[in-house]
Amino acid sequence: MIRFSDISKRFSRYQALDSIDLQLGAGRAIALIGPNGSGKTTLIKCLLGMVVPDIGSITFRDKDIRNDHTYRADIGYMPQIGRYPDNMTIGQLIDMMKDIRQSANPSIQRPDARPLDEELIKDLGLQQLFHKRMRSLSGGTRQKVSACLAFLFDPQVLVLDEPTAGLDPVSSGILKEKIDTETAKGKLVLITSHILSELDDLVDEVVYLQEGRVRFHKTIPQLQADTGEKKLVRAIAQIMI
């Protein structure tokens, strides 16, 4: 579904990405992990069109994304820290995003277009909070808003940056169940997290970045077989020794 081919990006003297080659397939939940400064954020920004690689290409469904913004309509993004207009209520924000998406993509107004996915709004109890202004929200509630917006337009690719950070255990469990459900539908879910224990029983593959390079890309069964460890945090530690 998504192919990174020889992607490199330098910021002044800092080599953020160095010859990245990755193939990410549909129907998979993939963890993108690595230490701070490993290139995770830059790689995600390249996929989202926020950073242009110096070298290489990115294809989405076999189509080069350079100079083509239309593919972004099929990507849902949950940032680590969501920044929204402070004076807007949750309900107003969601309505605004619906209007923006419909204005930018008139095709989603067609009767045969995919319906909105408001399941998380209901399951996380956001409807009862629609009157709350964004400036009054706790960090956890902001995370819920970000999660709901990421899934709302039924995208085929979900990019979730530290999705469970700040969430209470119940909300974290609801979000994990939603990720499992969407992966089973054939969607690609790309997850970054520093809390490796949150990824156990959630992801199918692991991509480990270090100093802008892919250290390894393995399925969970491959990683477990190579290390003899069932838990992701122990398996990663075994490889990095």
Image: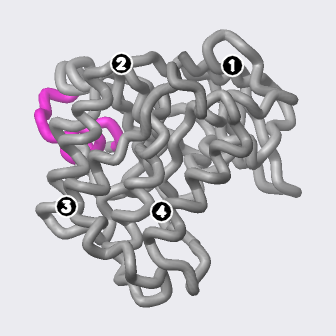
Q: Earlier in the sequence, mark 4 or mark 2?
A: 4
**What label sits on residue 80 in the rendered view?**
4
**What label sits on residue 186 in the rendered view?**
2
Separation of marks 1 and 2 at Cα, in angstroms = 18 Å
Badge 4 element:
loop
Q: Earlier in the sequence, mark 1 or mark 3?
A: 1
- Pick the front one: 1 or 33: 1
Q: Are marks 3 and 4 in contact (CB under 8 Å)?
A: no
Mark 1 vs mark 3, foreground winner is 3
Could you tell me residue 91's position as x and y percent?
Answer: 44, 69
Q: Amino acid at mark 4?
A: Gln
Q: Amino acid at mark 1?
A: Thr
**What label sits on residue 171 in the rendered view?**
3
In this picture, residue 75 sits left or right of residue 90: right
- At a point 46% along the width and 84% down the height, the residue shown is 133
Bounds of the magenta segment:
227-240
